[in-house]
């Protein structure tokens, strides 16, 4: 199934939930409004035409100029073939959701795809997006008492952390971007 | 393993309750919190698993990661892609060639670079050799976890030959940065292909030796068969990939199912987990620790098959496409996954028209594979926890990035 067909299936099931679906890119993704994401996720997983059972990746991208953080969910559907033949890939799709940088949140899909539980904790930790309904939303890679979200573009490295000086090898305290 | 006072756990309020109660025989029993790690031999690095135990049974296991976190993704946002390649070495440091390979492929897709034929073959040779080296470490250290010391000596003896080959090709033995954007950095040295063929002839019979030594060892089978069973549905739902997914009976390998590079030219099988009987020890079930271990042993044979086909077909020619160093990335993005020894490594590279990517996201297979630990370790025996964690075969450098 091509990304266009996936996009049109989502578009016909949730006409008011789809923002855009640009296809002239190397990574076609369907834009979805945050409030409707849970319904769309369940549809993507359970619809017999789609059956996206594998959440491959969840990435957060800080679009600081537009004042939002973009979440990209990469999905794949694995289909059994039987007779000892390799399974096949039914379809590959991506969903893109924009949330405001300040206080942005969206529904958690940790119960739809359990793989999302750690991915969402990582996005929460490194980009500061919160996921409503997540069973255990706390930092995962940084220490619990860390200040700030390192993958934000306006992140300033701490001057010190428990007595450890906090600057890079070039003496910078903020990213070059 | 040491028991820790409750006051140590500030971030897990649910684990702080007083579980003391009276047992059926009038004796007071209580649940105990045990920290396994961060310095524990069977966690293969700095991983802390917080175990809530009721006697010998594990009631709850919560992995705590991040001890090796270096925020490689932030570094990726400050370097040009070819400068980021050495950072990918340090993610899954037991399969650095594969990491270089997948990141290079992702950036090549973004730039639209075609790799020369010879370079593609060299990359497959390096990726498959590194797969063998990585599975050898998995085999050896899993033996250690299960109390069999000899296996690791055999594994490191053969791994040494592979590292010598890598050293001859690029000068490094662990962090290679050999595969790069557009191809590989140098052509193969003299006699490399002959030495590779000699190694394969030497190595292939050794796999049978490993099977006799460890795979069918009665004690080893008792420790791993039927332990930590993951169903195919659970494996997919938790995002498991690689040998962990195949051990659950899912015949899925990106090299065959969505071929990249030149993997569509090679003949090889995808080993999957099998139930006991017909040459497989009794008590083994699909998706258990033994199958996760044994899928890796079979994958080494398949890698040898691929390498032999590479030797037969490798052409002469250029080893690197002409890619300018200071190349501007288009304002587009690409998500690419490749089959690493531990599962599917993915990179999301977002360009913004400058030479430095706006975002580099790494999807580490170990990160996803480890996330199922809490689910599998619920209700198992304390002694099975190292068996389960070892069978998932994590490299903490990639879990934490």
Image (cartoon, grey):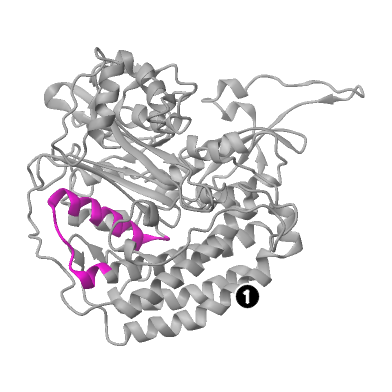
Q: Nearer the viewer, residue A163 or B145?
A: B145
Q: Is residue B390 magenta?
A: no
Which residue: 32% across, 38% down?
A92
| Image vertical order of residue B18 relative to residue B188, above or below | above
- Left or right of A55 in this view: A19: left
**Is residue A70 visible to us here?**
no
| Image vertical order of residue B87 relative to residue A148, above or below | below
Question: In the rendered structure, which segment of residues is drawn in magenta?
Answer: B94-120
Q: Residue furthest right?
A: B25
Look at the image and tell me in which quarter the N terminus of chain A lies. top left
| Image vertical order of residue B40 relative to residue B332, above or below | below
- Left or right of A87 in this view: B211: right
Total numbered labels placed on residues in the image:
1
The chain under label 1 reads B
Residue hosting label 1: B209
**Is residue B73 visible to us here?**
yes
Q: Is residue B108 magenta?
A: yes
| Image vertical order of residue B301 relative to residue B11, above or below | below
Residue B12 x, y percent position in the rendering:
55, 25
Q: Main secondary structure of the magenta part?
A: helix
Which residue: 9% across, 65% down?
B322
Q: Residue furthest front?
A: A83
Q: Nearer the viewer, residue B20 or B196?
A: B196
Which residue: 19% across, 56% down?
B83
Which of the 4 image quadrants contains residue B14? top right
Residue B27 x, y percent position in the rendering:
88, 25
Name the element at disc 1.
helix
């Amino acid at each position: 199934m091509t990304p266009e067909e996936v996009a049109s299936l989502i578009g016909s099931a949730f006409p008011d939930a789809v923002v855009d679906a640009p296809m002239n890119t190397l990574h076609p993704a369907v834009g979805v409004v945050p409030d409707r994401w849970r319904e769309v996720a369940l549809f993507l997983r359970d619809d017999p035409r789609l059956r996206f059972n594998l959440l491959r990746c969840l990435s957060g991208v800080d679009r600081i100029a537009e004042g939002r953080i973009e979440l990209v969910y990469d999905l794949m559907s694995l289909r059994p073939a039987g007779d000892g033949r390799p399974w096949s890939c039914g379809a590959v799709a991506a969903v893109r959701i924009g949330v405001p940088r300040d206080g942005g949140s969206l529904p958690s899909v940790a119960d739809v795809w359990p793989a999302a539980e750690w991915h969402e904790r990582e996005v929460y930790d490194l980009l500061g997006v919160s996921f409503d309904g997540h069973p255990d939303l706390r930092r995962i890679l940084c220490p619990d008492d860390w200040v700030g979200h390192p993958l934000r573009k306006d992140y300033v490295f701490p001057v010190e952390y428990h007595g450890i000086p906090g600057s890079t090898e070039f003496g910078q305290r903020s990213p070059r971007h | 393993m040491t028991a820790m006072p409750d006051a140590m756990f500030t971030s897990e309020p649910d684990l702080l309750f007083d579980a003391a109660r009276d047992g059926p025989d009038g004796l007071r029993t209580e649940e105990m919190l045990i920290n396994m790690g961060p310095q524990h031999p069977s966690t293969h690095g700095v991983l802390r698993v917080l175990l809530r135990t009721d006697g010998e049974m594990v009631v709850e296991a919560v992995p705590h990661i991040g001890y090796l976190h270096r925020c490689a993704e932030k570094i990726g946002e400050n370097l040009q892609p070819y400068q980021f390649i050495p950072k990918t070495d340090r993610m899954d440091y037991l399969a650095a060639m594969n990491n270089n390979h997948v990141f290079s492929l992702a950036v090549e897709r973004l730039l639209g670079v075609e790799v020369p034929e010879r370079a593609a073959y060299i990359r497959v040779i390096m990726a498959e050799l590194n797969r063998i080296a990585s599975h050898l470490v998995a085999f050896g250290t899993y033996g250690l976890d299960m109390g069999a010391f000899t296996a690791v000596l055999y594994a490191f003896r053969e791994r040494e030959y592979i590292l010598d080959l890598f050293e001859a090709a690029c000068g490094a033995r662990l962090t290679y940065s050999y595969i790069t954007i557009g191809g590989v950095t140098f052509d193969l040295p003299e006699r490399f292909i002959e030495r590779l063929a000699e190694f394969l002839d030497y190595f292939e019979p050794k796999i049978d030796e490993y099977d006799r030594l460890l795979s069918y060892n009665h004690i080893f089978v008792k420790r791993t068969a039927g332990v930590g069973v993951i169903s195919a549905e659970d494996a997919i739902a938790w995002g498991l990939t690689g040998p962990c997914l195949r051990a659950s009976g899912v015949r899925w390998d990106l090299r065959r199912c969505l071929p990249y590079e030149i993997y569509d030219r090679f003949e090889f099988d995808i080993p999957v987990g099998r139930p006991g009987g017909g040459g497989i020890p009794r008590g083994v079930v699909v998706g258990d620790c033994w199958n996760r271990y044994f899928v890796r042993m079979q994958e080494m044979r398949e890698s040898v098959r691929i390498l032999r086909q590479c030797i037969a077909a490798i052409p002469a020619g250029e080893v690197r496409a002409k890619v300018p160093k200071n190349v501007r990335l288009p304002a587009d993005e690409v998500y690419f996954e490749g089959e690493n020894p531990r599962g599917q490594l993915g990179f999301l590279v977002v360009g913004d028209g400058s030479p430095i990517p706006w975002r580099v996201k790494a999807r580490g297979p170990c990160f996803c594979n480890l996330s199922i630990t809490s689910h599998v370790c619920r209700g198992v025996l304390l002694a099975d926890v190292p068996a389960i964690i070892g069978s998932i075969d994590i490299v903490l450098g990639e879990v934490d990035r």
